[in-house]
Every structure is written in C-alpha cells, then in structure tokens.
Amino acid sequence: MDKLKVMTIFGTRPEAIKMAPLVKELERRPEFESSCCVTAQHRQMLDTVLDIFRIKPEFDLDIMEAKQSLSTITSKCLLGLETVFQQVRPDLVLVHGDTSTTFAGALAAFYQQISIGHVEAGLRTGDKYSPFPEEMNRCMVSRLADLHFCPTESNRRNLAAEGVAKGVFVTGNTVIDALGTTVRDDFRFTTEELNRLDYQGKKVIVVTCHRRENYGEPMAQIMKALRRLALTYADQVELVYPVHLSPVVQKAARSRLEGLDNVHLVDPLTADEMHNLMARSYLVLTDSGGLQEEAPALGKPVLVLRRETERPEAVAAGTVRIAGTHETDIFNLASELIESPAAYAGMAHAVNPYGDGTACRRIADAILYYFGRSSRPPETFQSR
Ligand code: UD1
Ligand code: UDP
C-alpha cells in the first residue's frame, strides 16, 4: 500500500512549537510520507524553533514583512500554497490553531479539494473580535476541516454545538508533548542575564504580551501595571519580559519599561529557554495562549492579560485567573500573589488538563483510522 502523503503547514512561533513533535511523530512512522511547508509568517521567531527541534522544511514561502497586515499574510500564503499543493498533491494537509497561516492553509487546501486536519480544534471564546482575528480563523477552519483534533473534551463540545461531530478526536494538546522534551534541571540559558537571576531569593515573574486586540490602550494599561509592580516590589521581584518582535509591541514595552533595574526586557527566547525560565519562575503574566497551557503543567500560577480566555480548563482547576487589561486589576491580583503565601499556594499546583504528552501519537493513529489504514481509533484523552 502507498504511504499516506501528509503535509504539515505552519508559520508562526506557537504553531511551530506545537507542530514540531507531530512532524517528528509522522517522520518516525513508516505509514506516512511526511513533508513540511512553512509560510514564515514569522521569520526569526520561527527559525529558532526549527533549529531547536531540528526540522528542515521542504518548502518555505518566506512571506514575512515588517508590520504586515492580515490581508497581506493571507493572500501571500494562499498564492504560495497553491503552487506547493499542485506540486506535492498531499492526501492530507495539517494546519494548527488559529493564525492567518492556519486559515489560509485550510482555504488553499480546500480550493484543491485536499483533505484537511485541524490540530488544536474547538477552542472558542464566542466573541468574534476577541482574540482578533483568531476566533474567526478557527471557526472558519472548523467549517473547512475533515479531521478535528481537539485538545480537551470541552473543545469537542464546542464543535458539537456548531454541528461538527464527524472526524472529531480528543487527543490532548501537542504542546505538552513538546514541553516533555525541553525542561531540564541542569539547563543553562544562552541569554547570560537569565543565568545570573536569583531564582531562590527573588520572585521571578515571566511576562509576555502581543495580542492584536490589546494594541493601543489595553497594552498601555498592561505596561503601566508592570511598571507599578516593578517599582512597588523593587527589592522582591524581577520581571523577565521577552519582548515580541512586532514593532507595535516593542514600542509599547520599551517606552514604559526601559531603564528599570528589576525589569529585564530581553529578545524573544528560544522555546527551550522559555520553558526552562517558566519552570524556574514564581508567576506568569501573559496574554499568550500557549503559556496558559504550559505554565499550569509546570505548577506556575498565571494571570491572563485579557478579558476572556478560550482555555477555561486551567481556570476551573484554579491555576489560571483572568486579570483583564486594566492597570489596577492587574496590579491588585499580582500584588496578592506576591504578598500572600496562602493566595499563592492556592494557585501554585501542577495540573494537566491539556495533555499527557502523547497527543501526537493519538493524532497519527486517528489519521490512519480515518484513511482506513487501521481498524482502531485512538483512545480518547482524559484530563486528570
Ligand atoms: C501572530 C498570530 C497570532 C499568534 C502570534 C504568536 C495572526 C493574525 N496572528 O501574531 O495568532 O498568537 O503570531 O506570536 O496570525 N516579527 C518579526 N519577526 C518575527 C515575527 C514577527 O519581525 O519572527 C514582526 C514583523 O514586523 C511582523 C510583526 O512582528 O510584521 C507581526 O507579526 P504577525 O505574524 O503579523 O502578528 P503576531 O502579533 O506575531
Ligand atoms: N515562547 C518562546 N519564546 C518567547 C515567548 C514565548 O518560545 O520569548 C513560546 C511559549 O513557550 C509558547 C509559545 O511560544 O510555547 C507561545 O507563543 P506566543 O505567545 O507567541 O503565541 P500564542 O500562544 O499566544 O498564540
């Protein structure tokens, strides 16, 4: 029997981190002829992930521009992928999550009538404009996809509520597979500043912030809250903030936080550095999706710098709280976790609602089952 031709498409840092272990799994299995196409919607932030996980894509569309618009990303991906799909004719295209690369990847595959598998399917906020444009990207991909790999049972229910019930598998999130390969006790950071931090004596707070719906006043409020935290707890707290390369984010962060002794504005970290930094930290403040999944697995409390989340599982488990985007709310919640050991202990316990480290195996098994190459579906991921 011919091998199944599966092409994995991704373009940004988080997609790369979460697709990397799946690419490895597909390469390992004799039933698949695996290939990889990156759009490079992100350039430097993608390349570091490819290096760490030793992935050499067969195709690279190299589309990134400074301050790119949503239309530019989508149209460049669509045109580039058309050529790649015509050349390779995969049996299945895999896209991940909710970026513009994801949406364009699914649409380009649909135009060629190629089957589509959606990894990290079924996340929803119910708010069309938040996260923007990700909420609509993932809704549209759910309409286009044939296979839906939901991290959790609640993601499956979201799809069922929209009438999507065929080809749905609950697999866990591949990010937990990735995390299992990066965190080590003897890890040394290549960013020397991070080796010098006093992780025992100080409360090290990891910060990230990049979402488009936070551009403008919400991001300004977030930066003010961070400044106030750094000044109020100057002798107790070290803020480590790897600043996203988006010029909008760089300006917002540097204009308010540069020059404070206990604020470390560093370049984006490689995935292994970020995972090991979180593992050594006290608290995480973020608007990132991926960090909301990783930090709970590492037992670190998270305050989400957004108005809502599509990842309610860790909120229910008590390790993640929605802080919103107002300076005072963020400051008050973080202060409580800095000052009150009881409040901190209430949130700092390791939970793993998002995966057990074997999501990629389940996804590969589900693909074989869907294409009639195996008679058994994978067992459903049950969160503990
Ligand atoms: C994108 C995704 C978002 C995801 C985020 C992860 C969309 C619409 N947004 O948002 O869902 O959460 O990635 O980080 O798909 N840049 C560089 N080098 C890089 C990466 C970015 O210089 O390696 C700069 C460029 O100027 C680029 C800008 O950042 O134009 C914004 O990148 P873009 O992919 O458009 O948006 P993100 O905010 O990164
Ligand atoms: N990450 C990283 N370096 C950084 C910041 C984040 O490797 O400097 C990782 C993080 O551990 C997670 C992913 O990038 O795996 C999250 O990406 P991002 O926050 O850019 O996007 P989102 O998850 O919000 O879509």
Image (spheres, helix red, strand yellow):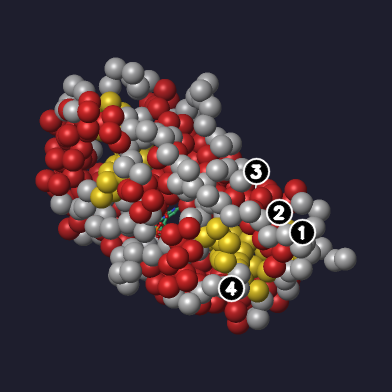
Q: Position of residue 135 (x, y in %)?
A: 38, 68
Q: Are marks 4 and 2 in contact (CB under 8 Å)?
A: no
* Image disc number at residue 119: none
Q: Quadrant of ligand 1?
A: bottom left
> Which SS class for mark 1?
strand
Mark 2 = which residue?
26
Tell me the crowding category of disc 2: few under 14, some 14 to 19, or many 20 or more residues within 10 angstroms, Cα based.
Answer: many
Q: Earlier in the sequence, mark 4 or mark 1?
A: 1
**Looking at the image, is 138 positioned above or below residue 330?**
below
Mark 1 = which residue?
32
**What residue do we see at 32% from left, 48% from top?**
315
- 2 vs 3, front mark: 2
**What residue do we see at 88% from left, 66% from top?**
1
Mark 4 = which residue?
166
Q: Position of residue 103 (x, y in %)?
A: 49, 71
Q: Are marks 1 and 2 in contact (CB under 8 Å)?
A: yes
Q: Earlier in the sequence, mark 3 or mark 1?
A: 1
> Which SS class for mark 4?
loop
Tell me the crowding category of disc 1: few under 14, some 14 to 19, or many 20 or more residues within 10 angstroms, Cα based.
Answer: some
The CB of the residue at mark 4 lies under 8 Å from ligand 1? no
Q: Are marks 4 and 1 in contact (CB under 8 Å)?
A: no
Mark 3 = which residue?
54
- 3 vs 1, front mark: 1
Instruction: Determine the CA span between mark 2 and mark 3.
Output: 14 Å
**What residue do we see at 30% from left, 65% from top?**
130
Tell me the crowding category of disc 4: few under 14, some 14 to 19, or many 20 or more residues within 10 angstroms, Cα based.
Answer: few
Q: Is residue 190 left or right of residue 217?
A: right
**What residue do we see at 54% from left, 77% from top?**
144
Q: Nearer the viewer, residue 88 or 47?
A: 88
Instruction: Determine the CA span between mark 4 and mark 2.
Output: 23 Å
Q: Is residue 62 left or right of residue 364?
A: left
Q: Earlier in the sequence, mark 4 or mark 3?
A: 3
